Amino acid sequence: MTDISREILLEIYKRMNEARAFENKVSYFFARGMVHGTTHLSIGQEASGVASCMALREDDYITSTHRGHSQVIGKGIDLNRMMAELLGKYTGYCKGKGGSMHIADVEAGNLGANGVVGGGIPIAVGAALTQQMKKTGRIVLCFFGDGATNEGSFHESVNLASIWKLPVIFFCENNLYGMSMPQSKSMNIENIADRAKAYGIPGYIIDGNDAIEVYKTVKEVAEYVRNGNGPVLIESRTYRWLGHSKSDAQVYRTKEEVEEWKAKCPIKRLRNYMLENNFASQEELDKIEKKAVEDIEKAVEFANQSPEPPLETLTEDVYA
Amino acid sequence: MTDISREILLEIYKRMNEARAFENKVSYFFARGMVHGTTHLSIGQEASGVASCMALREDDYITSTHRGHSQVIGKGIDLNRMMAELLGKYTGYCKGKGGSMHIADVEAGNLGANGVVGGGIPIAVGAALTQQMKKTGRIVLCFFGDGATNEGSFHESVNLASIWKLPVIFFCENNLYGMSMPQSKSMNIENIADRAKAYGIPGYIIDGNDAIEVYKTVKEVAEYVRNGNGPVLIESRTYRWLGHSKSDAQVYRTKEEVEEWKAKCPIKRLRNYMLENNFASQEELDKIEKKAVEDIEKAVEFANQSPEPPLETLTEDVYA
Amino acid sequence: MKDMKEMTYKDAVKLAMCEEMRRDENVFLMGEDVGLYGGAFGVSVGMIEEFGEERVRDTPISEAAITGAAAGAAVTGMRPIVEIMFMDFTTIAMDALVNQAAKMRYMFGGKAKVPMTLRCPGGSGTGAAAQHSQSLEAWFCHVPGLKVVVPGTPADAKGLLKAAIRDDNPVVFVEQKTLYKEKGMVPLDEDFIIPLGKGEIKKEGSDVTVVTYGRMLPRVLRVAEELEKEGISVEVVDPRTLVPLDKELIINSVIKTGRVVLVNEACKTGGFIGEIAAIIAESEAFDYLDAPIVRLAGLDIPIPYNPRLEAAAVPSEEQIRAGIMKVMNR
Amino acid sequence: MKDMKEMTYKDAVKLAMCEEMRRDENVFLMGEDVGLYGGAFGVSVGMIEEFGEERVRDTPISEAAITGAAAGAAVTGMRPIVEIMFMDFTTIAMDALVNQAAKMRYMFGGKAKVPMTLRCPGGSGTGAAAQHSQSLEAWFCHVPGLKVVVPGTPADAKGLLKAAIRDDNPVVFVEQKTLYKEKGMVPLDEDFIIPLGKGEIKKEGSDVTVVTYGRMLPRVLRVAEELEKEGISVEVVDPRTLVPLDKELIINSVIKTGRVVLVNEACKTGGFIGEIAAIIAESEAFDYLDAPIVRLAGLDIPIPYNPRLEAAAVPSEEQIRAGIMKVMNR
Ligand SMILES: Cc1ncc(C[n+]2csc(CCOP(=O)(O)OP(=O)(O)O)c2C)c(N)n1
Ligand SMILES: Cc1ncc(C[n+]2csc(CCOP(=O)(O)OP(=O)(O)O)c2C)c(N)n1
Ligand SMILES: [Mg+2]
Ligand SMILES: [Mg+2]
């Protein structure tokens, strides 16, 4: 049985449920054309995004991705302001200028989702450099997908971090596809973790649908990284249940495959684990789930009642 | 004893001597400010550049580098037109517009030296794609340095070639430094060949100062690659005797290290091998050496007598 | 010329690619998700069925390698079309495009041809925010060796893309995402080619010249038609190809009308209409100008997410109208 | 102000870095071979001895990661200076610079600062051919969120670089390789700062305005001095910072003289002087213009290797003189 505390497990469970409820809502909005633009949902990947961030110290940093809702909820975010951002409101994290792909909260350690695949990886390395130079003891958790590991920015950044022994965890959420491209076609190797060998750093493969494994691995790796041993690459295997973005007919994968993975739901899995091991009662967990849905409804309400950004803000904040 | 024919060994020896003589001349010119710009000499690396190209079929392609004189002489080039290009003359390979860093002869299979570190790697991949799509049976030998393997273009290109099983040999001339940066500081691994693991392709380490090993390995690998097995990465370990470019005080390495490597001269080594194994007589080899020097003198004469490019050519050839 | 057919801008792009791929086996398409998925905007839907995965190639997410590989394939005899999913991601391909593809021919003394076409959708208006909405054509216009095309109608999209594919130089072909679903009559003739460098007067007029291209073209045309009713005769000039630019067409129109408004969606500072303004100001048309040149362009800001803000970041029909009124001194 | 000292442009750049690194421990330098080697042009020679390898960081050849890491370091509290060895290689860093560093603040609703300086040497004249000689400043000027500086004298190099380092935004600082060894008097005052956005009249005059910057500045000044003797009074305006641009200074000078010649080294099409021409042509100065604007720029070609060709690719003093004569109708 795990030695993770009940409090932490419950918190992970809560945030995973918030992420799920948040994205269900967002999906609903998009399906009805109630939101502008596009979004990339991480339903099915909640353990990966949430439990990894939960294993950080509060003052650690993350760089998030286009598929980042679970990640930033894992890091701890105000759901109201997050929903407001998604709806383009002035009360949102980016005053309505960023939207789903740019949710950021630099002060709280979230250096931003990124619309560019691989775009956040060098930023994570730079943030880690700051921590090393200033000896803050903080580390950076850098998220990206399987597809992103084919970008040059991945290679250059991991190499740079490896030679400078920077405190950064490269966390690859391998959901088997980069848009329509299966991992098996986009690279000639099975384990993305093997790419660590090109930089002389440790590589781990974990079950990204197992919140406990995710949490424990990141916790352990975080200490290694924090102690000045240099970066680590973690490959977290998971799956997105929904299409790549708003508009995706998903012709590139089978319904059976999707169903198979839905059966591996990370939220259900943690729930069952907690029940089986008496970490929590059915009612407790139901309550958390219900509360998550309610909180998202409240967030929607908050967002709906929030003002649009004033037109004057259009030309503000281009320069500091 | 090697099964490489006497003719081939003599030809390799000849071209290595031509490369050496060519670069000695160029070095002389630059030291006296008789040429404009800069150049990157490969003295000490001749086995690597020459013997690898000699192992190709004549109709195969190469992409060369900023340190490419040995490579293109290995591929077979007209020394007159090469020297003329270096001196910026109209009779040069690029009509005087390219210079040392851009010597190219597309028809003869030399897709160009490159002033951008790593810039030729994707081009090689594209050329290999042509061969595969057109089923020409030709392959591409792609040169780059140790430093170049830290560029994103290396990573993206090798990955692309690996998934499409393209007929390209990635040939890394590891001369231990990228400008002033020792390999040991620019990456956290000892063997660049290990980077092959990130792409699921074979990686070889060879003694780049041993013309015979270089020739045999490339010959063997070329067949593998030509047969549709996909790309291979070869790390050829060698050393440049001179500074990185025209102006380099070489504070980043010791005189002893340079002397150590000079003792491993690839030309002397092949010479001794041929003598010891009765491939050729002292006189024969002396004659080749002498002829190389003379041919370079003739090339200089040719270049000197060649016209400058007419001013009208300035705006020609921007577009086809 | 054979028949015409009404079709969307997107379908016109596809038709051009399909016709050229049928005509020349050296032409092929590669890019992220261009195969089964049919491209992020669905431009190539169905092409993989006709041409197979060899010629409609899905690539990994590796813009630098894809673009550089296109250059390498082009210089060795193919005629690749590369799709970069959003114009914003050409940032990752700039070495391959600018230092390699564009310069190879010149650096090699004329002994290379690089017949490749890089297609990318540009512009805002889809709610995709700052990293998916840029109009960066001015960058490419500043790179000798590249040609740059920005079609504003379905017919132009077809005729110009075919010309780009047949051209022996690297061509950056900027599609306009907000026009993808716009319809227009498109010639079905398989040899319907619009030569690169030939602009078109989209509407004749005598009082004022408006030079524009791409997404702004339909806006300008709508305003011009309204103003016609109000007695202001607007000539709308669309260069279509930015490099090479049909300077003569522009200058002659300005000489005729004596007044000029320039409109593009890109950020004002450093946008291509600045270049057009300079060309006019240094030409013989200068002496015919009855009023200062008016430029209407996107604001100098990243594109924001909020739809109201996003819309306000680029010239609206009202602003275009006001710009024309200003140059008319009304 | 303290003493002045004569020094090279290169040493002025170094002095600015050293002073700022002494003043603020968050400032550090990183780039390829900037340490022991002292940088490809020797700008940082000796700095590693004073500041150590933590603060004068040699990097692998990884322009994208270096630039992106600078953005990441900047947004978390450092003030990095990145040296990209040649401006041509910013092509590899464009995503980091354009999509990340430049837009972070805006995308995040004003809740980030990215105080980084990207130094790079631009321009031709060193025999390094097409991939090592470009003048790409116009690209960066077209990216809201970036500031762009091109100093033309040692004193400006010092004062502007210090301002760039202290600025809370990403600044692209374009050094001019052919000016590195040029000497000039430089203030030693450690608080000698030239505010970004403030141009300077380098020579007063009344007959014609020449706007120029960077490498072309000394050429223009030499021509202006010669012409002075011949009775033509040339005002030379150097914006120094291209973004933000001191429009007022330019416009007022044009209003005063009624004639304007614009000179830059970059390729003509899409070069920044096109933007300046547009600004003049849409301003109140338009009504004061007595002749069409004259632009003198680099040819629209890659830079060739041969020295004679290379020299002919950018405006010469003769051409500058001829341009001024033309606008004077002589
Ligand atoms: C540089 C770049 N290229 C392409 C895209 C378009 N795009 C957005 S997400 C995506 C797939 C990313 O795959 P992966 O890294 O595996 O992340 P996932 O979406 O699976 O979470 C692509 C191609 C982009 N945003 N940025
Ligand atoms: C993209 C890029 N960055 C930097 C440079 C400057 N530069 C030229 S050669 C060189 C070192 C290359 O090292 P390596 O790849 O090992 O090749 P070597 O010079 O040792 O043959 C550098 C940094 C360049 N030409 N291109
Ligand atoms: Mg994925
Ligand atoms: Mg090397």
Image: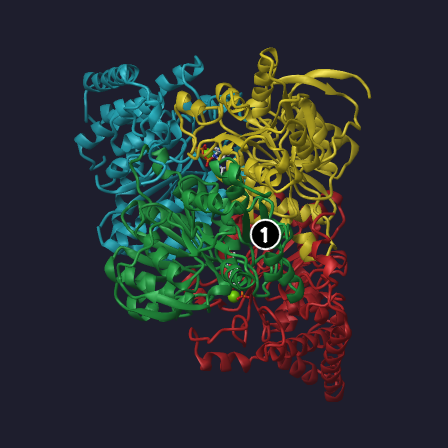
Chain colours: A red, B cyan, C green, D yellow
Q: Position of residue A229 (x, y in %)?
A: 65, 49
Label 1 residue SS: strand
Residue that mark 1 sits on: C297
**Is disc 1 surrounded by few (<14), some (14 to 19) or many (20+) residues within 10 Å?**
many
Apparent side of residue D144 relative to residue B234 in the rendered image (left or right): right
Residue closest to the eye, B219 or A89 = A89
Note whether A40 is above or below B253 in the view shown: below
Residue closest to the eye, B229 or C114 = C114
Apparent side of residue A209 relative to residue A129 in the rendered image (left or right): left
Q: Position of residue B44 (x, y in %)?
A: 38, 26
Q: Does residue B197 show up?
A: yes
The chain containing the residue under callout 1 comes to C
Note whether A234 is above or below A35 in the view shown: above
Which image quadrant: the C terminus of chain B?
top left
Residue closest to the eye, C190 or A253 = C190
| Label 1 lies in ligand 1 vicinity (Cβ under 8 Å) | no
Please report the residue visible at 43 percent of the width from the left and 60 percent of the height from the top.
A187
Please report the residue visible at 66 percent of the width from the left and 21 percent of the height from the top.
D205
Residue closest to the eye, B129 or A90 = A90
Note whether B178 is above or below D231 in the view shown: below
Which image quadrant: the N terminus of chain B?
top left
Q: Position of residue D187 (x, y in %)?
A: 75, 21
Q: Does residue B168 show up?
A: no
Apparent side of residue D266 relative to residue A4 in the rendered image (left or right): left
Apparent side of residue A297 relative to residue D124 in the rendered image (left or right): right
Task: Name the amino acid, label 1.
Answer: Ala
Note whether D208 is above or below A16 in the view shown: above
Please report the residue visible at 27 percent of the width from the left and 63 percent of the height from the top.
C189
